[in-house]
Structures are given as C-alpha cells and as structure tokens.
Amino acid sequence: MSVVISGGGPAGMMLGLVLARAGVEVTVLEKHGDFLRDFRGDTVHASTVRLMDELGLGRGFAALPQSRLGNLVVTVPGVGPVKLSSFDRLRAPYDHVAMIPQWDLLNFLVAQAQREPTFTVRMNTEATGLLRERGRVVGVRYRTRDGEEGELRAALTVAADGRHSTLRREAGLVPEEYPVPFDTWWFRLPRHAHERDVPPNLVPGFGRGDMALSLTRDDYFQIAYFRTKGADPQLRAEGIERFRERIALLLPQYADRVDQLASLDDVHLLDVRLNRLDRWYQDGLLLIGDAAHAMSPAGGVGINLAIQDAVAAATLLAEPLRRGRPTVAALARVQRRRWRPTVIVQRMQRVLHGVMFEPVLTGRRVGPPTRLALLARYVPGFRLLLSRMVAFGPLPEHAPAFARRDG
Ligand SMILES: Cc1cc2nc3c(=O)[nH]c(=O)nc-3n(C[C@H](O)[C@H](O)[C@H](O)COP(=O)(O)OP(=O)(O)OC[C@H]3O[C@@H](n4cnc5c(N)ncnc54)[C@H](O)[C@@H]3O)c2cc1C
C-alpha cells in the first residue's frame, strides 16, 4: 500500500527512506525547491550516527562536510573554565556530536532514498489539505509552485511538516503549548583563515538580559542570539549599530567583524516553540517530529528526536502497510513507543529554559548557572551522564532488520 508524507525535513525523509526499503510505495511532498531554509540546527547526535551505520550509510555520511563538536566549556565567574560535557569519554565510534549543515544531511538522505524504486520525492509541492472518506483520512490535496493543484490518495498519510504543520491544523489537532522564555535570532560572521585550525566548538557568551552561542562552520561562524520572547520589534527599533555593540560585548572575540552585519535584514528571527499533541494520530493519519511535538533548540536534540520518530514509525508500520491499511491501534503504537522519550526530553528542555536561559534573559544572573557548573566539575559521573543523555537520548531506536544494509 502507499504512503504520502507531507514534509521533507529530517522526520519525513528518514521515514521515506526506511519505508521504501520495506518495499512500501512512498511519496514525500516538500513545499520548498531545496533544503536551504532558515537555520534549524546542525547537530547530528550519536544515536543518529549509529542509525546511519546500521542502515549501511556510515561511509557516505562520514564523507559529508562536517566537524565534531568538542566539549562545551563555560567560564563561571569566580570559578574559571568548567567543562560541562565529556563526549570524549563515550565509547567510540559513537563518542561525538557531528555538526553537519542540515541541507547536506537532507540532500544525502534524499539521494539514498532515491536508490529505492518505491521512493518518490516531489519538491515545490505543498500539502494543502486532507482527503477524507467516511471520517477516515485517505490522502492529501496539494499545490505545486506553478499553481497546479491535485490529490494524492494513500493508505497512510503522515504529517512531518514541522512546527507550523498544515495537516495538523487541517486535522483539527491543537498541541499543548509550554511557555518558552526566549526567541532566537540567527546570523553569520566570517571565520578568518588563521582561525581554521581552531577546533570547532560551541562558544557561549552571557550578558545581562541576553546571551549568544557561536557554532563553528567551515568558513563562517553561525551565531545564535537569545533574548526574551517577543523582543524582535524592540531589537529592530534599536537598529543595527546597537545590535553590533551587543554582540561585541557578548562575544568580544568577534568585535573586529560585527560591522560585517550590514543591516538587521541579515539577522533572522526564529520564534521558538515547545509543544506536544496529546494524540499523534487519527484514522489514516500519523503525525511525527515537530508536527507532533515542537522542540526548542535547548540541547540541540530536535533533529535527532524527529529521526527517531521516523525509524520507530517505519519499524512498527512496514508490516501493517504491506498487508493493507494500518489500523488506528497500529498508529497508536507509534505514539506509545515515542511518548516517553519525547516527554523526558521536553521536560529536560524546560528545566534548561528555567536554569540556563531565564535567569540570564531577565537580568537576574550574568554567566552560566553556577550550581550546574559545580555539579559538572565536582560530582563524578555527572558530566558523562549528561553527555550520554545528549548523545543518545532516552530509548534510542535501532534500524529494523528489513532496512539494514552492509556499509
Ligand atoms: C532556532 C532553532 C534551532 C534549532 N537547533 C537545533 C539543533 O542544533 N539541533 C537539533 O537537533 N535540533 C535543533 N532544533 C530543532 C529542530 O530544528 C527540529 O526539531 C527538527 O528540524 C524537526 O524535524 P521535522 O522533520 O519534524 O520538521 P522540520 O525540520 O521543520 O521539517 C519540516 C519540513 O516540512 C516542510 N513543509 C512544511 N509544511 C509543508 C507542507 N504543507 N507541505 C509540504 N512540505 C511542508 C518544510 O519545508 C520542512 O522541510 C532547532 C530548532 C529551532 C527553532
């Protein structure tokens, strides 16, 4: 039987690939013409790297342009530099977080999926609504960039269309929203030739009322600036000169290049959300990834969680799909399997919001959380536990036997 997936992000592409390996006819609809969209994180964690190996994609994945994230070191006033993570103590080869531009990862997944005869991707094609028959979802309506409209019928429709999911809205499903104290603004600053030898790292900068994080890319630094939610109009009213000053204060090592930001048009707002649906399915419809549970950037785990959802869904649904239409009970099993890891990770993100972000953004603290840093410094095993949680997350998935290939 056939599956239509709305959304060619990490969740949709991985689901398409794994289901196609089971011989299921899959069509992924992606509304954009390429994957070069707003920055949505680069981190590929050990759980995903291991999946790539299990799928026989390890060598191709390793050849993608990437860097390995070093340990996160923060400077605590009065204490000095403190290492918060110990990825180097995890068991090789799954002892790191890889930083890969998301478009490279998605292009790689599409190329692999296209080797399967039952996989189709339709770029520039937006799912606009659900087809229903006798209350059951039986496919989607779509519109191409050229304005052509059509319908695609399927035994199963999957909404993997992200935080602002159209199909979720069409299904009448409303997620519970958890308050998020910050928004994120993204921009790039150049990386000079003499800085190329510096190992890639996450470099935080703390102010009174704002903070920033620098991520190293091949020829530039990707900067995330954090401030209280809803501050965008004020930030834009203050103008580019004030913004440059703020960045130079937070990350003084880049003070020599903040004038490369020509205007605030170079600074992109991403409205951060954290939410979760109570029910991830209806008869004929399944929601996975951010469409079911939007993740905040805290901990940088959303891509990996979306991929884990996809692998779990393919594992549980390949056989029912081979036999016909999956029942509602089969769809419910996917939610049951992914519910606990999702809740645990979202709870941890809310703790991080409260401990790491809120005190800084409300001006109550300048610098990283001292207690967390002291725990990392003095409690044996804490750093390793934290690193393991970030690298693998709770209840990580493995590739199902039907999708495994030799590398
Ligand atoms: C500021 C920010 C930074 C982040 N940083 C990180 C990080 O460093 N590491 C990390 O792991 N996670 C990070 N995340 C979280 C991560 O981006 C998401 O959790 C993850 O991308 C979810 O994957 P997804 O496939 O479910 O959805 P998405 O990645 O949102 O993909 C959805 C896809 O569906 C397409 N689409 C949307 N609507 C339609 C439609 N109607 N029809 C067809 N196609 C459609 C979109 O174009 C998109 O390609 C960050 C999130 C934010 C907001």
Image: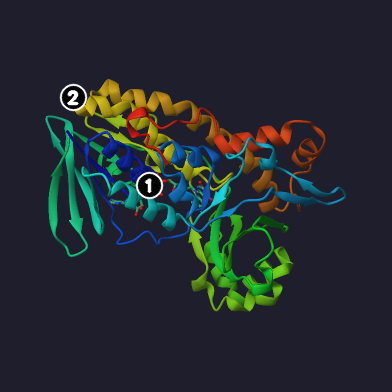
Amino acid tagged 1? Gly
For marks 1 and 2, give the one nearer the viewer: 2
Q: Is mark 1 within 8 Å of ligand 1?
A: yes
Question: Can the viewer see residue 232 in this picture?
Answer: yes
Q: Residue furthest top?
A: 329
Q: Quadrant of residue 94?
A: top right
Please say if 248 is above or below 120.
Answer: below
Q: In the drawing, does residue 197 fall left or right of residue 3? A: right
Q: Residue 83 appears in which quarter of the rendering? A: top right
Disc 1 to disc 2, how far (Cα)? 29 Å
Q: Position of residue 268 (x, y in %)?
A: 49, 64
Q: Which mark is residue 323?
A: 2
Q: How is the image coloured?
A: rainbow
Is ligand 1 less than 8 Å from the beta carbon at label 2? no
Query: Is residue 56 shown left or right of residue 259?
Result: left
Q: Which residue does the image show at 22% across and 36% down from the upper left? A: 24
Vertical comparison of 61 with 171: above or below: below
Q: Nearer the viewer, residue 344 or 203?
A: 203
* Callout 1 secondary element: loop
Q: Residue furthest right?
A: 78
Q: Where is mark 1, residue-wise?
A: 162
